[in-house]
Amino acid sequence: MSITVAAFSGSLRKESFTTKLVKAFQKNAPQGVTVEIVDIGKLPLLNEDLETNLPEPVRDLHASIERADAILLATPEYNRSYSPVIKNALDWGSRPAGENRWEKKPTAVVGCTPYAMGAFGAQHHLRQVLVYLDMPALQQPEFYLAKVAEKFNDKGELTDDHTREKIKELWAAFIPLINKLK
Ligand SMILES: Cc1cc2nc3c(=O)[nH]c(=O)nc-3n(C[C@H](O)[C@H](O)[C@H](O)COP(=O)(O)O)c2cc1C
């Protein structure tokens, strides 16, 4: 088995829990699965004027999506919605018009919050956009990580066994979907 998953964190903050979560997914990926964490912090804000000469970070994003068999989107929750950083990447990945690079890429959505409800509102707004981009979403298991500050140590390592089990359960469901659509 050889699968490449492009993983995106919706937070640019250095100590981001969302990025720590993405790294935990990377570390706990099954054998044969390579998780490439894509840097979307250098993408310009979407501007159609830039489409005549795509900036290098946009071209890099396009290449990352193209070489991926699947996508992992990790979002924080901002005012009960998902990260504008993720939206910006989704929009750039769908441009120029008629060149939606996300199309048919199996996609898993996860999220976390230091508070309650596990970024539920964020994830469901994000799932709505996947419909239009034609990204087949892993429906179950869902992944809502609450109280995330208690789940990682100060080196950014996951310390919570239950969360690790949930990560493994998600991979166990995601891999068959990826292989089916590959
Ligand atoms: C503008 C803003 C809005 C927020 N709204 C929510 C929210 O609706 N729900 C929630 O659980 N946390 C909310 N938070 C708190 C974030 O979950 C918290 O800052 C989290 O650590 C951000 O993710 P990160 O650690 O990956 O950067 C908000 C934070 C900001 C900055």
Image: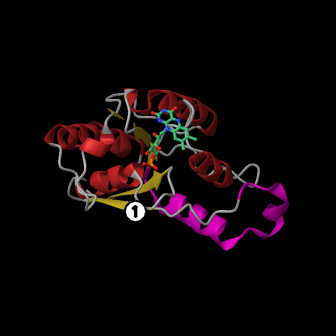
What is the x, y in percent for residue 68? Answer: 45, 58
What is the x, y in percent for residue 24? Answer: 28, 53
Task: Please tell me in which quadrant of the rendered image residue 31 appears.
Answer: bottom left
What is the x, y in percent for residue 21? Answer: 34, 49
Task: Name the residue rendered at 39%, 26% in the picture.
Answer: 117
Judge left or right: residue 161 versus residue 38. left
The front one of 167 and 66 is 167
The residue carrying pointer 1 sits among few (fewer than 14), some (14 to 19) or many (20 or more) residues within 10 Å by Cα, namely some
The range drawn in magenta is 45-71
Q: Evaluate whether residue 2 shows in this view.
A: no
Would you name the residue on which mark 1 appears?
A: 36
Question: What SS does tag 1 mark?
Answer: strand
**What amino acid type is highlighted by mark number 1?**
Glu
**With respect to residue 158, does 40 lie above or below?**
below
Task: Name the residue rendered at 48%, 58% in the picture.
Answer: 13
Task: Name the residue rendered at 28%, 58% in the picture.
Answer: 156
Task: Please tell me in which quadrant of the rendered image residue 14 appears.
Answer: bottom left
